């Protein structure tokens, strides 16, 4: 039987994969038709008809992971590293009968490479589904608290 703690543990596990640079394992958590979205504007509702920081389907996520894992990715020598400090996720949708769940997690995200460090405050919404007894990501929305600020490149995956 699926519990709220199982859902929360999944979110902690996903961030651990990212922090440890285990991008291929992280990619395996995604459904083939899932979308990773980072809106450009505060409370942006439309990812298709408005500009976003990113709106990536499975193909684009795979390209990103290949780049991060690649030996010839010279912009990643030395590799960037990240660290997520997350609050306990809220489970806003908990429907084990339908196998659908949604979490909202506030976090601080730090990305570093050489002597440069970037700190972002985020709210992340995960849409999860149960497939053969395992959680899979059906969608992920990463909202930057200060989305209207000027940003440098975000190399990894908040």
Image (cartoon, helix red, strand yellow):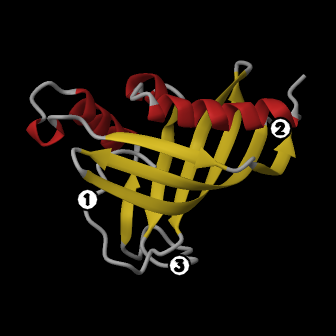
Residue neighbourhood size for the residue with mark 3, other residues' Cα within 10 Å, grouped as few (<14), some (14–19), many (≥20)? few
Q: Secondary structure at mark 3?
A: loop
Q: Secondary structure at mark 2?
A: loop
Tell me the tag on residue 42: 3
3 and 2 marks in contact (CB < 8 Å) = no
Calculate the distance from the C-alpha at mark 1 to the C-alpha at mark 2: 39 Å
Query: Residue 44's x, y, as percent?
Result: 53, 76
The answer to whether residue 114 is above or below residue 5 is below
Nearer to me, 133 or 125: 125
1 and 2 marks in contact (CB < 8 Å) = no
Nearer to me, 136 or 77: 77
Residue neighbourhood size for the residue with mark 2, other residues' Cα within 10 Å, grouped as few (<14), some (14–19), many (≥20)? few
Q: Secondary structure at mark 1?
A: loop
**Sequence order check: which comes first, mark 1 or mark 2?**
2
**Sequence order check: which comes first, mark 3 or mark 2?**
3
Residue neighbourhood size for the residue with mark 1, other residues' Cα within 10 Å, grouped as few (<14), some (14–19), many (≥20)? few
Query: Residue 46's x, y, as percent?
Result: 51, 73
In the picture as drawn, the residue positioned furthest to the front comes out as 115
Tell me the tag on residue 153: 1
Query: Residue 110's x, y, as percent?
Result: 43, 51
Q: Residue at x 25, y 45 (%)?
A: 113
Q: Residue at x 90, y 22 (%)?
A: 1
Q: Residue at x 46, y 49 (%)?
A: 158
Residue annotated with mark 2: 98
Can residue 48 be seen here? The reply is yes
Query: Residue 152's x, y, as percent?
Result: 26, 65
In the picture as drawn, the residue positioned furthest to the top comes out as 132
Residue 27 location, quadrant:
top left
Calculate the distance from the C-alpha at mark 3 to the C-alpha at mark 1: 19 Å
């Amino acid at each position: 039987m699926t519990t709220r703690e199982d859902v929360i543990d999944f979110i902690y596990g996903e961030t651990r994969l990212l922090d440890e640079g285990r991008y291929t394992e992280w990619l395996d958590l995604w459904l083939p038709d899932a979308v990773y979205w980072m809106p450009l504007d505060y409370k942006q509702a439309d990812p298709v008809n408005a500009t976003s920081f990113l709106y990536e389907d499975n193909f684009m996520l795979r390209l990103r992971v290949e780049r991060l894992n690649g030996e010839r990715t010279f912009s990643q020598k030395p590799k960037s590293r990240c660290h997520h400090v997350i609050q306990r996720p809220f489970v806003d949708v908990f429907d084990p009968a339908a196998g659908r769940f949604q979490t909202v997690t506030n976090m601080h995200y730090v990305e570093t490479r050489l002597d440069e460090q970037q700190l972002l405050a985020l709210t992340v919404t995960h849409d999860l589904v149960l497939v053969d007894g395992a959680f899979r990501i059906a969608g992920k929305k990463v909202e930057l608290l200060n989305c209207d600020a000027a940003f440098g490149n975000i190399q990894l995956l908040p």
